[in-house]
Image: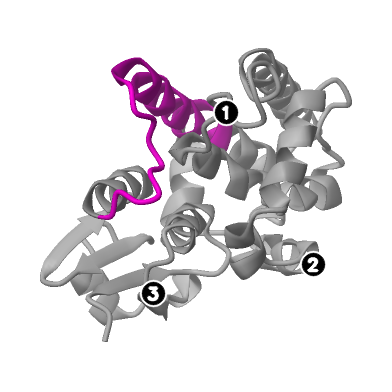
Amino acid sequence: MSDITLYSAPSCPYAQRTRLVLHEKDLDFELVEIDLKQTPDWYLALSPTGKVPLLLHGEEKVWESSAINEYLDECHPEPPLMPGTPLLRARARIAVDFANVYFAPLYYKLLLAETPERRTAMAQRLADTLEEMERYGPGHHGPWWLGETFSLADIAFYPFFERFPVLAHYRGFELPGECTGIAAWLEAMRARESVQAQGEPASFYVEAYSHYADGSANGSTAHEMREA
């Protein structure tokens, strides 16, 4: 029996990050799926935030995807998902922070935008951000976010791109044609066994995110992104 339990939700991009790490490292784990539209009381008592992912490792509890993923990489260092030098590890953390603080919020803000003016503004901000990512991201020094080294930086960004069909369906937004490096990186990500093992089709996400698009989402992520 595995000593790792992951509390997850199929539609959650943050939980998918940790599922990717677990698959990349070929670790046995128990997966417990949480219905975030009706979060059970027992999970609210277990989780300090009420969100997913939450990792139980034996008796120890770790939450927040970025912290969980570095924890798993340190506990199970093969294959490594952080680079071997201090400089590249710093760059990996900068990329993960950018994904968390800038990129992911714009994804949600565009999807949650209720007026045409707000949607236009958020679409422009996301396009500008993607063009900035294109300038320093994959394709310049190798296929991955840090060049030749696949890392937690790639894992931090990918789940949101897997959900881009949601933006195309509800907001008419697609990856700008100028972002050729990101497009090539996406193809490389889709070819990885970890992605193929636990990804979902576009139709799944279009249905799962409908309550974000129609304004009825009332979970913690929706509240946070509306207020930010």
Which residue extends farthest bottom?
1
Secondary-structure class at tag 1: loop
Looking at the rendered structure, the secondary structure element under dot 3 is loop
Q: Which residue is mark 2?
A: 203
Residue 45 in the image, given as x and y percentages of width and height: 19, 72
Tag on residue 148? 1
Is the stretch drawn in magenta largely helix, strand or loop? Answer: helix
In the depicted structure, whether residue 44 falls above or below residue 101: below
- The earlier-in-sequence mark between 2 and 1 is 1
**Residues rendered magenta in the picture:** 76-105
Provide the residue designation for mark 3.
Answer: 39
In front: mark 2 or mark 3? 2
- Separation (CA) of disc 2 from disc 1: 32 Å
Q: Quadrant of residue 202?
A: bottom right
Q: CA distance from mark 2 to mark 3?
A: 23 Å
Q: Quadrant of the N terminus?
A: bottom left
